[in-house]
């Protein structure tokens, strides 16, 4: 009889523990839901600082809950809208590490490219007409690579068409940057460096409008270096038709900034000022993962 009662007592204790676990899970889900709803309300009214804070709290307290996956996607968007591209990139990379086969991985590549592409831009610079292509070129190169990954690995994604247009923008921006560097050297009569940059433009950006001024600069550099034969060769080449490329093909990533090795490091805090948005309007809101359930 003692053994029988001991077994009954053990069964009762196990049942009580199970009941407590279920109750604890329900409580955690309710708290996570409250955090997410607060963040969602902030997103709806454009309060990106509050939305970011709530989503970060959600990730810290409930990293594996039913709202975790949707919160990770939303963080990419809120960081971008809070004008914190470094954190947006870090959040996109973190999402892919945690959810490598998730159906919304293409969205993370698109938003990563968008954040990097607009890293040097803001509304004030656009308003005063600052040419941001002359600033830090590394984020543009990284954006190019993000868009290219999206196009090559997820060709059926809804973001591919816009990514192709943005790659064209980045391609032209890279050409303008190289031309500005070549002119910088020419203004200082560093003719060898100017000639090298001009040749790079002609070879790497054959479809860009910068080819003609690059050839003019190259001719000038050759004459300054007392190389008249090469200068005449540039004039002859200008009369020949440039090689045509397939308009539908994505251009190869040119070695735009060979001496640049800086990377965009994650920012410890999100900013609070909203960005000016993408060139084609506001970026797409984070896709729903199915009620926050993290579908794969």
Image (cartoon, grey):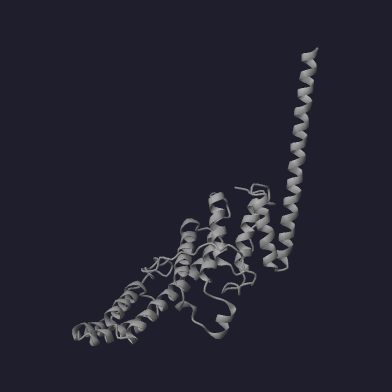
Quadrant of the frame with the N terminus: top right
Residue 84 position (above or below residue 172): above
In the depicted view, which residue is nearer to us: 246 or 12? Answer: 12
Query: In this view of the protein, can residue 111 be seen by the observer?
Result: no
> Residue 254 lies in what quarter of the image?
bottom left
- Pick the front one: 282 or 98: 98
Q: For this rendering, which residue is in front, 126 or 294?
A: 126
> x%, y% of residue 50?
70, 64
Q: Residue at x 50, y 60 (%)?
A: 150
| Image: 217 above or below 277 | below
Above-or-below relation of 188 to 205: below
Q: Specify whether 149 is left or right of 17.
A: left
Image position, residue 224 (x, y; %):
24, 87
Indicate the position of residue 97 as horizontal and vertical percent values: 53, 51
Q: Looking at the rendering, which quadrant does residue 193 occupy?
A: bottom left
User: How many numbered badges does the structure rendering display?
Assistant: 0
Seen at 30% across and 86% down, the residue is 189
Give the left or right position of residue 253, taking residue 95 as reference. left
Q: Residue at x 40, y 65 (%)?
A: 261
223 displayed left or right of 110: left
Q: Position of residue 142 (x, y in %)?
A: 46, 65
């Amino acid at each position: 009889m003692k053994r029988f009662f001991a077994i009954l007592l053990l069964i009762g204790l196990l049942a009580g523990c199970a009941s407590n676990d279920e109750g604890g899970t329900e409580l955690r889900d309710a708290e996570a839901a409250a955090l997410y709803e607060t963040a969602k309300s902030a997103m709806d009214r454009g309060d990106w600082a509050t939305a970011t804070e709530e989503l970060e709290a959600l990730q810290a307290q409930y990293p594996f809950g039913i709202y975790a996956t949707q919160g990770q996607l939303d963080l990419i968007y809120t960081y971008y809208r809070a004008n914190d591209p470094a954190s947006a990139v870090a959040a996109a990379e973190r999402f892919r590490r945690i959810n490598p086969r998730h159906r919304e991985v293409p969205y993370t590549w698109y938003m990563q490219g968008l954040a990097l592409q607009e890293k040097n831009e803001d509304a004030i610079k656009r308003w005063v007409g600052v040419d941001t292509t002359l600033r830090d070129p590394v984020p543009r190169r990284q954006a190019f690579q993000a868009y290219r990954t999206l196009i090559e690995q997820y060709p059926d994604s809804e973001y591919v068409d816009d990514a192709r247009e943005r790659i064209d923008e980045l391609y032209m921006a890279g050409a303008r940057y190289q031309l500005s560097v070549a002119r910088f050297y020419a203004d200082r009569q560093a003719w060898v460096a100017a000639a090298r940059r001009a040749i790079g433009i002609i070879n790497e950006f054959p479809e860009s409008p910068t080819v003609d001024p690059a050839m003019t600069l190259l001719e000038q550099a050759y004459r300054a270096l007392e190389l008249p034969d090469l200068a005449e060769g540039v004039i002859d080449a200008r009369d020949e038709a440039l090689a045509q490329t397939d308009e539908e093909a994505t251009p190869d990533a040119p070695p735009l900034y060979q001496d640049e090795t800086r990377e965009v490091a994650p920012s410890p805090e999100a900013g609070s000022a909203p960005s000016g948005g993408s060139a084609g309007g506001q970026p797409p809101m984070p896709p729903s993962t199915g009620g926050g359930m993290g579908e794969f």
